[in-house]
């Protein structure tokens, strides 16, 4: 429009000039047309340059400077920025990408980001991630990836789908932060908090453990002098049941005390919650009214079960600390499946899911004052006296919930008390059914079992149990003796301890399987962390001490059956 106005104004001025000079009467029409065009170009060119071309050129230079500045800012950012097209092919990475991953831009441009993937996340993880991107438009979470040199690193990733007016398909912008060092520090802090949590439970656990021991000692004494065989059997069964209760209490402590490498998978969450709640109840005083409502069915979560249990333990411990010395002392837990509403408060959930699991922990304390509420999730913040707490309980709980794509909401109750509500996205993968073992499986064939354990009591007890089931038995008190027996006699199955002097169970079994490659083996140990290097398969199983005879007999039967069928 501006160009038309300039040309029109210039042409009008030329026509006036030609009229004054009487050009049309002086020169032929062709010459007049030439002079008109020449004058139009001569007069309008400076105006066109000044009013149109120069502003466009200046605007173009400004735009280019802005683009250069934006690219410089992107390249100078400490976070890695990756942009991919609708086919998930990478079209841009900044300099931080090379710093974090070791890949140059030419290594990744035009390729799929899956070249960074490690084996720490399964396909279900990526399926849930893309479901969130396609439905909500973004996803945020943590994952483990692999650098160009093969080393693994932990990253915080935020992916957002971006639509432009120049393309029908979206672009995907990923913001990546290397959190390897941060997670290492968090792991140390979380372990410190776990030890502190267990410390608060020790008094209650000691009380309950002594109660169990009293039950065992009392029933053993009564069984010793009992004349009625049926009464004696009843007391022995009671001793067995109490012993397993004590075993579960010890296992609960070991789960929280040990360091572990977090690994998420789809699990039925109700048994996990029951285990955590039972562990917490072990340490609560008897004067606390404790109620728990768990959901019907088997809701599934994609989670790390130990971290979820620690989260529940922290929330219950926090509720216990908030209870008054006098008056009503109660803790209520309610777990239910629900439809998630968008979150708008400080603990915003970036991965709102249509279906969630809501876990609320309520106490009958005095509530949380408004000036404290904004700080309760800050690391090392505590309202307790110096030396009475780490100030990490709620902080690590909040971090765990965020790492699982959830949110945490806090509010005071009327007339008293406080509620912490956890919201976690559900997974809808089917849960494989697990059949319960409720009977002892006797021998179906004349098999020989080699029992290896450095504890005579365990070794002799296993010999008597296997003998009572109809199996032949051979005994060894350490790994090398077991190998010597294998070289001299036929063995159908080995039951071995894991931790033994000189040669441990895992090493001795490796040597025995050089003699008999498909040798069925059951590993038993009281050190659960020693299980990490034992892979269960058709020829290998593992059972924790103290073991249930019904389960042990079933595993022996299945392993021997599998060997015969193979």
Image: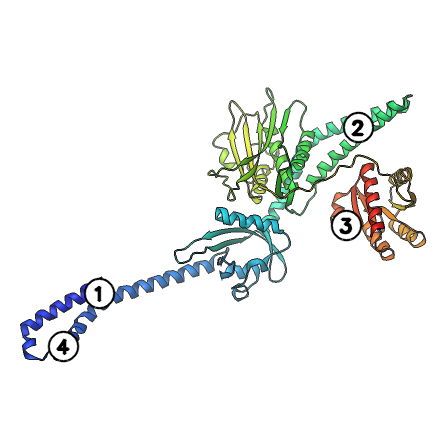
Please state the horizontal and vertical placement of residue 171, each as a whole percent of the image.
46, 56
Disc 1 is placed on an element classified as helix
Q: Which mark is residue 413?
A: none
Residue plotted at (49% across, 37% down): 341
Q: How many marks?
A: 4
Cα–Cα span, label 1 and label 2 = 99 Å
Which residue is at the front of the view, 384 or 420?
Answer: 420
Cα–Cα span, label 4 and label 3 = 98 Å
Q: Which mark is residue 537?
A: 3
Cα–Cα span, label 1 and label 4 = 21 Å
Q: Is 468 drawn above or below residue 239 in the view shown? A: below
Residue under numbered circle 1: 3
Residue under numbered circle 4: 35
Which residue is at the front of the view, 80 or 184?
Answer: 80
Q: Which mark is residue 213?
A: 2
CB within 8 Å, label 1 to label 4: no
Please state the horizontal and vertical placement of residue 447, each as a whole percent of the image.
90, 46
CB within 8 Å, label 4 to label 3: no
* Residue 332 visible in the picture: yes
């Amino acid at each position: 429009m501006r160009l038309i106005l300039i040309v029109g104004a210039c042409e009008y001025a030329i026509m006036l000039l030609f009229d004054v000079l009487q050009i049309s009467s002086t020169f032929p029409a062709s010459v007049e047309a030439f002079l008109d065009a020449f004058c139009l170009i001569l007069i309008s060119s400076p105006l066109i340059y000044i009013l149109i071309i120069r502003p466009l050129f200046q605007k173009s230079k400004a735009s280019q400077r802005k683009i250069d500045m934006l690219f410089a800012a992107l390249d100078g950012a400490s976070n890695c920025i990756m942009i991919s097209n609708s086919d998930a092919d990478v079209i841009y990475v900044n300099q931080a990408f090379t710093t974090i991953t070791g890949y140059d831009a030419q290594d990744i441009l035009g390729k799929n980001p899956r070249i960074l993937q490690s084996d720490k996340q399964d396909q279900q993880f990526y399926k849930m991630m893309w479901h969130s991107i396609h439905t909500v438009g973004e996803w945020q979470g943590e994952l483990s990836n692999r650098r160009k040199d093969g080393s693994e690193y932990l990253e915080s990733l935020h992916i957002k789908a971006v639509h432009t007016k120049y393309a029908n398909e979206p672009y995907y912008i990923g913001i990546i932060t290397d959190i390897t060092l941060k997670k290492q520090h968090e792991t140390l802090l979380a372990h410190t908090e776990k030890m502190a949590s267990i410390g608060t439970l020790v008094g209650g656990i000691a009380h309950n453990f002594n109660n169990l021991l009293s039950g065992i000692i009392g029933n053993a004494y009564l069984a010793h002098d009992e004349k009625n065989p049926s009464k004696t059997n009843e007391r022995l069964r009671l001793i067995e049941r109490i012993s397993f209760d004590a075993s579960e209490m010890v296992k609960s402590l070991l789960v929280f005390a040990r360091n572990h490498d977090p690994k998420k998978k789809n699990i039925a969450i109700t048994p996990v919650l029951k285990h955590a709640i039972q562990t917490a109840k072990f340490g609560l005083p008897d004067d606390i009214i404790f109620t728990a409502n768990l959901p019907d069915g088997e809701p599934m979560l994609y989670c790390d079960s130990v971290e979820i249990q620690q989260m529940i333990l922290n929330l219950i411990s926090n509720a216990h600390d908030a209870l008054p010395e006098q008056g009503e002392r109660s803790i209520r837990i309610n777990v239910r499946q629900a439809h998630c509403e968008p979150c708008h408060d400080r603990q915003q959930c970036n991965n709102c899911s249509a279906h969630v699991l809501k876990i609320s922990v309520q106490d009958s304390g005095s509530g949380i004052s408004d000036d404290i509420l904004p700080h309760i999730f800050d690391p090392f913040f505590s309202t307790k006296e110096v030396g009475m707490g780490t100030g990490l309980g709620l902080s690590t709980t909040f971090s765990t919930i965020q790492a699982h794509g959830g949110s945490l909401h806090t509010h005071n109750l009327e007339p008293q008390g406080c509620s912490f509500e956890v919201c976690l996205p559900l997974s809808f993968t089917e849960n494989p059914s697990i059949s319960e073992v409720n009977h002892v499986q006797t021998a179906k064939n004349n098999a020989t079992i080699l029992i290896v354990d450095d504890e005579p009591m365990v070794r002799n007890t296993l010999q008597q149990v296997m003998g009572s089931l109809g199996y032949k038995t051979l005994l060894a008190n350490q790994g090398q003796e077991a190998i010597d027996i294998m070289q001299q006699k036929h063995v159908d199955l080995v039951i071995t301890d894991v931790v033994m002097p000189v040669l441990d169970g895992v090493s001795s079994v490796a040597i025995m399987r050089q003699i008999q490659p498909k040798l069925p083996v059951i590993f038993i140990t009281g050190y659960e962390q020693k299980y990490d290097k034992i892979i269960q398969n058709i020829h290998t199983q593992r059972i924790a001490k103290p073991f249930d005879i019904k389960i042990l007999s079933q595993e022996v039967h299945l392993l021997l059956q599998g060997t015969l069928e193979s």
